[in-house]
Image (cartoon, rainbow, N blue to C red):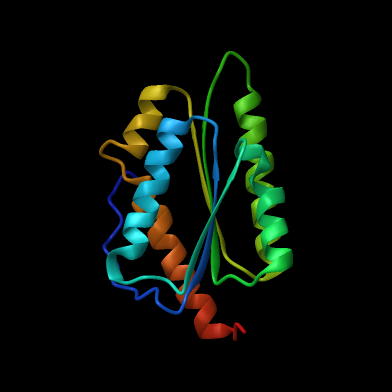
Amino acid sequence: MSLDPSPHSSIDPRNFRIGIVASLFNPTLVNSLLARVQEVIHENGTPKELLLERVPGANELPVAINLLLEERKFTCVIGLGVVIKGSTSHHHLVAESAGNALQSLAIKHNTPIINGILVTDDLKSAEERVTGTIDRGREFAQASLHMAKYKEKWTTIS
């Protein structure tokens, strides 16, 4: 991802149904990321629906999002998690499998899913991207609004 700040968007979310599924793992970072996403979504209005669900970790995001999309219609869904490298390469396996599953679900359900899983090699890099100078929360929120607008333009949601 780019280190350039994302441009401010003035997309009105009032007609959007947005789902957010956030990991409970790395709670300080994920909670900060979640708060930023919610703040940016609300900058230009209140969505018709903003549903929040929590799951144990990033690996559980795809199944939770699939369950949501099997039962409800959303204009866009955001999956949030923070995966930091430990002493093995497990973080790559989690991030890659979850990311691939999210993309498959987006196509299966014809619903944009924003992959808001941050993957870093260390805590400092994660903090820079969540609470520091690199505002990934804004980027994820802006991407969700743009894709919700795109979906609204090209489909009818009942």
Task: Tell me where residue 141 sits by quadrant.
Answer: bottom left
Residue drawn where x is 66% and y is 38% of the image: 59
Give the residue drawn at x 43%, y 54%.
140
Q: Is residue 74 left or right of residue 4?
A: right
Residue 104 in view, yes or no: no
* Residue 100 to residue 49: above or below: above
Quarter the C terminus occupies:
bottom right
Above or below 76: residue 35? above
Q: How many marks?
A: 0
Let me know if residue 156 appears in the view.
Answer: yes
The image position of residue 155, as x and y in percent, is 59, 84
Res 42 → quadrant: bottom left
Nearer to the camera, 90 or 71: 71
Q: Is 76 situated left or right of 108 in this image?
A: left
Image position, residue 103 (x, y; %)? 65, 56
Q: Nearer the viewer, residue 65 or 147?
A: 65
**Residue 34 x, y percent position in the rendering:** 42, 47
Position of 93 relative to 150 (above/below): above
The relative height of residue 2 versus residue 126 in the rendered view (above or below) is below
**Location of residue 108 in the rendering, given as x and y in whole percent from the top left corner:** 73, 65
* Most foreground residue, 156 or 91: 156
The N terminus sits in image quarter = top left
Furthest residue in direction top, as rendered: 87
Which residue is located at x 40 percent, y 43 percent? 33
Q: Residue at x 65, y 62 (%)?
A: 106
105 lies left or right of 148: right
